[in-house]
């Protein structure tokens, strides 16, 4: 069986996506870059990369042991990230519960040969790629989102570009 490109994410609902779009569109008009399709908006929790298809069911079973949670994030600005040249929606604060969730997922993945990332976790939603340098753009009003679940998401490349698809649990 082939490997699939996977990551765990907080996946916004359609209602959340519409609210984000309405609030960030005025700010996005100030950014030079390629807008990310709002259907691809997400907050990566853990990037897995290539993962053996035959191990997906076992991985999904392992993460079911993670305790239910509630995550609230308040996004208040769009920031430029130099190295990947992206514009991203960023929260000012990262709740401890979110960092705990990321660590729990990483620990479950270790069983499957995953090596946890040593960098500081920075939740964000990429809203534009190939962006030109800009200073932080404050949003006219903050975006407050909450989740009580996460998704295993597959990256699928096609002639139309990259699409992200949550896998059924």
Image: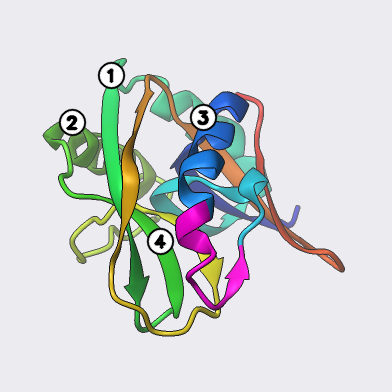
The image shows residue 7 at horizontal and vertical percentages of: 50, 49
In this view, the residue in front, 152 or 61, is 152
Image quarter (top left, top right, bottom left or bottom right) of the C terminus = top right
Q: Earlier in the sequence, mark 3 or mark 4?
A: 3
Q: Earlier in the sequence, mark 3 or mark 1?
A: 3
Q: Earlier in the sequence, mark 2 or mark 4?
A: 4
Residue carrying label 4: 88
Q: Under tag 4, what secondary structure? A: strand
Which label number is shown at residue 16?
A: 3
Q: Are marks 2 and 1 in contact (CB under 8 Å)?
A: yes
Residue carrying label 2: 97
The image shows residue 113 at horizontal and vertical percentages of: 40, 55
* Eye-nearest disc, 3 or 1: 3
Q: Is residue 48 above or below residue 131?
A: above
Q: Are marks 3 and 1 in contact (CB under 8 Å)?
A: no
Q: Is residue 54 above or below residue 71?
A: below
The image shows residue 134 at horizontal and vertical percentages of: 36, 79
Report, in whole angstroms, how far the alpha carbon at label 4 lies from the one at label 1. 25 Å
Specify whether residue 16 is painted magenta: no
Residue located at (27% from left, 62% from top): 117
Q: Are marks 2 and 4 in contact (CB under 8 Å)?
A: no
Report, in whole angstroms, how far the alpha carbon at label 3 lies from the one at label 1. 18 Å
Label 3 environment density (alpha carbons within 10 Å; few <14, some 14–19, many ≥20): some
Q: Under tag 3, what secondary structure? A: helix
């Amino acid at each position: 069986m082939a490997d699939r490109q996977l990551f765990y994410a907080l996946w916004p609902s359609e209602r959340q996506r519409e609210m984000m779009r309405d609030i960030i569109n005025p700010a996005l008009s100030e950014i030079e870059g390629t807008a990310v399709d709002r259907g691809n908006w997400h907050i990566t929790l853990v990037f897995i990369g290539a993962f053996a298809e035959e191990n997906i069911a076992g991985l999904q079973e392992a993460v079911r042991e993670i305790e239910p949670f509630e995550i609230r994030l308040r996004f208040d600005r769009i920031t430029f990230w130099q190295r990947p040249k992206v514009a991203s929606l960023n929260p000012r604060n990262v709740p401890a519960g979110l960092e705990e969730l990321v660590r729990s997922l990483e620990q479950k993945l270790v069983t499957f040969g995953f090596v946890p990332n040593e960098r500081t976790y920075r939740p964000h939603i990429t809203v534009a790629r190939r962006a030109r340098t800009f200073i932080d753009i404050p949003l006219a009003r903050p975006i407050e989102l909450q989740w009580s679940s996460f998704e295993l998401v597959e990256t699928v490349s096609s002639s139309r570009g990259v699409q992200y698809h949550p896998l059924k649990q």
